[in-house]
């Protein structure tokens, strides 16, 4: 039993480590793409690097600010079913008492 648990733990550690490495690699690639885009825009437009970085920063802020999934249908359904399930469990428990 202990050996089986240890094998599962090791497998999960490997899975999470590989997943984390993939996330970090993708973040690094995304950052490199942004830098390449800024390089190309600097060459094409003649704008200073600091000005292009300022534009990139404002774009990031504006896009992050609009990503609010609080009112998404998925979130509303999850909340509704969660509350309904809780009320149902309470009703069942009240009838048993």
Image: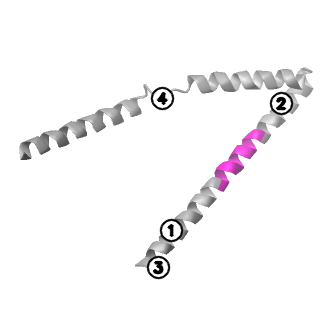
Q: Is residue 97 left or right of residue 19?
A: left
Q: Which residue is pictured at 48% across the width and 29% down the height?
A: 69
What is the CA distance from the residue labelled 4 to the residue labelled 1?
34 Å
Q: Earlier in the sequence, mark 3 or mark 4?
A: 3
Residue 1, relative to residue 69: is it above or below?
A: below
- The residues bearing labels 2 and 3 have C-alpha atoms spaced at a distance of 53 Å
Whichever of labels 2 and 3 marks the residue nearer the N terminus, that label is 3
> Are the residues tagged 4 and 2 within 8 Å (C-beta)?
no
Q: Nearer the viewer, mark 3 or mark 4?
A: 3
The residue under label 3 is 3
Instruction: Please tell me whether mark 4 or mark 1 is closer to you in this view.
Output: 1
Q: Main secondary structure of the magenta part?
A: helix
Q: Which label sits in the foreground, 4 or 2?
A: 4
The boundaries of the magenta stretch are: 21-31
Circle 2 is placed at which residue position? 38
Q: Which of disc 2 and disc 4 is earlier in sequence?
A: 2
Quarter of image, res 30: top right
Q: Earlier in the sequence, mark 2 or mark 1?
A: 1
State the image quarter where residue 82 is shown: top left
Task: Report the Cα–Cα distance between label 4 and label 2.
Answer: 30 Å
Q: Quadrant of residue 44?
A: top right
Residue 84 x/y as whole percent = 24, 35
In this rendering, position of residue 19 left or right of residue 50 = left
* Magenta run includes residue 76: no
Instruction: Find disc 4 in the rendering and name its residue.
Output: 69
Identify the residue under disc 1. Answer: 9
**Looking at the image, is mark 4 or mark 1 earlier in the sequence?**
1
Residue 10 locus on image (x, y percent)? 54, 70
SS for tag 4? Answer: loop
């Amino acid at each position: 039993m202990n050996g089986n648990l240890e094998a599962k733990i090791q497998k999960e550690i490997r899975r999470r480590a590989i997943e984390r490495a993939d996330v970090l690699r993708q973040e690094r690639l995304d950052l490199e793409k942004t830098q390449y885009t800024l390089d190309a825009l600097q060459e094409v437009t003649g704008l200073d690097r600091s000005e292009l970085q300022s534009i990139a920063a404002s774009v990031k802020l504006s896009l992050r600010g609009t990503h609010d999934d609080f009112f998404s249908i998925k979130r509303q359904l999850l909340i509704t079913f969660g509350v309904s399930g809780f009320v149902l469990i309470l009703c069942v428990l009240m009838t048993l008492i």
